[in-house]
Image: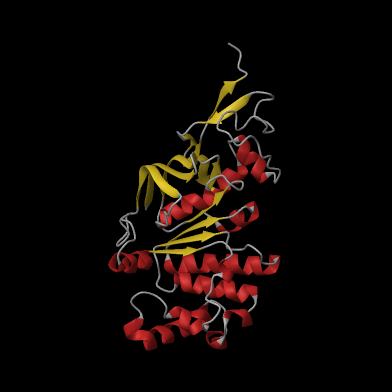
Amino acid sequence: MIKLNDLKISYRIGNRVIEAVNGVTLTIPDGSIVGIAGESGCGKSTLMKAIYGDIQSPMSLSGGSIEYGMKGADGLPVTTETIRREWFKSISYIPQSSMNSLNPVIRIRDQFTDFPGTDSNKKRVLERARAYIGKLGLPAEAMESYPHQLSGGMRQRVMIALATFFQPELIIADEPTTALDVVVQKEILLLLMEVQELMGNTILVVSHDMGVHYQVTHKMLIMYAGRVVEYGDTESVFADPQHPYTKMLIDSLPTIGDDSMRGVLASMAGAGGDRAYRVEPELIEVKPGHFMARPSQIVGAAA
């Protein structure tokens, strides 16, 4: 179980400080697929990097904490080889454009042995890897290929195989279907679901595509302007969205409003005409297991 406690992540750009994640408090249960949606710049990828422990300048932790509740992942900075080895056994990350993240100059087989702690038993690792890629729909000969010799869908399958090979308790998938055609996207999504059912781990999926979340996830988290505005069971969020921004995402008609924190929801259809809103950090339980950050009128209100 992962607990985010008033988490704040900022970027320092020159003399400016940008709050990319602003006061997120959330509990992510074990053994579930959780989808994270929101427009570009809302803080999705920043939140995932923070959970993964990849906090590097100009990004910084400006407040709050993360509790992992898993062996070997206690929130310490990944600074020593010992911590790094334990960390990667517990948490795995599939980045954006991940199919282009494979080392282009070594064969697929060697990418499986390029992990900390695999030097002493490479033969055994390769035997396991050959058997494992077969379960994920990859032919055995793929192990002898270079990345450029594989299709985009096959490269993405290899990335998922690499990310799940050591059976991590948490997998973070940041836009896992980007640049793939519709048919291959469906195959990759089904593969993620199969992996989760097989291992019983937790998967966080970041995607702009609401259809991806509907097909794959058990729970949905909607972000806007660095904050969580709605969180609940996926079916509940889709069937009965509570926040105006969530409704717009589901209608596939998102309107990008002012990027300042003042009046950030002013232009949303159904948000109250010309009234402007801000997002409060507290999540209100609107019904069992379904939470929403209730907008508060702050601009243009009658006295």
Residue 220 visible within the image: no
Residue pushed farthest top?
303
Residue pushed farthest front?
14
Residue at the image point whose x is 39% and y is 83% from the top: 125
User: As rendered, which of 90 and 27 lies closer to the eye?
Assistant: 90
Q: Is residue 173 above or below residue 302?
A: below
The number of callouts visible is: 0
Q: At which x and y percent is residue 15?
A: 48, 39
Q: What's the coloring here?
A: secondary structure
Q: At which x and y percent is residue 19?
A: 48, 40
Side of 57 where 211 appears, left or right: right
User: As rendered, which of 52 and 244 lies closer to the eye?
Assistant: 52
Q: At which x and y percent is residue 269?
A: 69, 33
Side of 12 where 189 appears, left or right: right
Q: In this view, does 79 lie above or below 43?
A: below
Q: At which x and y percent is residue 294?
A: 53, 31
The quarter of the displayed image where residue 181 is located = bottom right
Residue at the image point whose x is 39% and y is 75% from the top: 115
The quarter of the displayed image where residue 104 is located = bottom right
User: As rendered, which of 269 and 286 lies closer to the eye?
Assistant: 269
Side of 14 where 259 appears, left or right: right
Q: In which quarter of the image is the C terminus?
A: top right
Residue 277 visible within the image: yes
